[in-house]
Amino acid sequence: MNRLAVLGHPVSHSRSPAMQTAALDALGLGSEWTYEAIDVEPDRFDACVRELPGEEFAGVNVTIPHKEAALAVADQASRAAQEIGAANTLSFAAGGIRAENTDATGLLASLPGPVEGRTALVLGAGGSARAAVWALAGAGASVSVWNRTGTRADDLVRDLAVAGRDTPAEGLLAPVSGDQARAGSYELIVNCTAIGMGDEDPFEHLPLDPERLDAEIVLVDLVYAGSESRLVTEARSRSAKAVDGLEVLVRQGAESLRIWTGMEPDLDVMRDAARGKSPDG
C-alpha cells in the first residue's frame, strides 16, 4: 500500500482527501494508494514527518502552518521550493525526503492566460503569497505586494529579490501600502490571505475597491470554504474574470500526484470531487 496525506493544523476543512482519492480511483490506483488528512501541531511536525516513511507513506501535501517547516525537514529540495522558502509537497524515497512547491505551478496553470508584461497585486506575505509572487515575477509580471504588517511584505520582496533565480526579481517586485494598493491599476489580483474565510467583509480588511473590479481584471482568491467567496462573487458580478481557491487547489494537487505516481490525473474528476459532486453527477 502507498499511503498519501495532507498535513496541516487545522486540516479538517481540507478538500484534498476527497479530491485526491477520486483522482487515484480514476487512475486505477484506488486499491494500491490511499489519501488521508492528518492534523499535526507545529511542535510535532518534524517528528511526524520523519515517522511517515516507516508507515508506508510515499508522500504528503503540506498546508498551513507547516510549509516553511516542510522545506526545513527535507534532505533535498527543488529550486522552486528553495527560492520560495516553502514547500507544499514532500516525497519519501530511499534517498530521503524531497521537497517540492506546486503552489507556484498550480497558480499559473489556473490563470486564464499568460502573465508576462501584466501588473499584479499579491495580498499577503505567508507561504502561499511567497509562491504566488515567485511564480508571477518569474513569468514576467510586475508584482506589488501588500500585507497588513508592512514589514513582512518588505521582507518577502527582499528575500525573493536575492533568491538567485534566473529571472531577476529586482525591478519586478515592490512592497506597497494600503493606499498605494487601492490607488494602483492592476490587471491581476491574488488574495493569499485568510480574509474572506469567515463572515467578515473582505473589502473592509483588504485594500481593494469593488468599484474597480471590471472585465479587464483577473482576480484569484485562494480562500475556499463551503461556498463561493465574497471576493469571487463580487468580481464575477462586475464582469471580472475570477479564479477560486478550489481551482488552484486542483491544479497544485494534480502536480503533486504527477510527482508521486508519474501519471496524469483527470482534472475534471478532481474538480467535481473538490466541489462535492458525486462521480455520476
Image (cartoon, grey):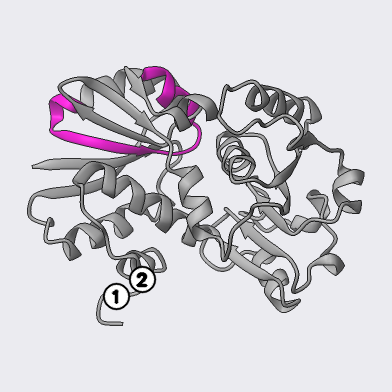
Q: Secondary structure at mark 1?
A: loop
**Kind of residue sitting beneath label 2:** Asp
Q: Nearer the viewer, residue 272 or 107?
A: 107
Marks 1/2: CA distance?
7 Å
Q: Bounds of the magenta span?
A: 53-74
- Residue at 39 percent across and 29 percent down: it is 78
Can residue 6 be spotted in the picture? Answer: yes
Question: Could you say whether the residue bearing mark 2 is in a helix, strand or loop?
Answer: helix
Q: Residue at x 60, y 35 (%)?
A: 130
Q: Quadrant of residue 243?
A: bottom right
Q: Nearer the viewer, residue 269 or 77?
A: 77
Residue 89, x across and y down, in percent: 36, 36
Instruction: Please give the residue where the numbered disc 2 appears in the rendered image.
Output: 272
Under mark 1, the amino acid is Ser
Q: Is residue 204 above or below residue 100?
A: below
> Residue 234 at x, y = what percent?
72, 71
Q: Which residue is mark 1?
A: 278
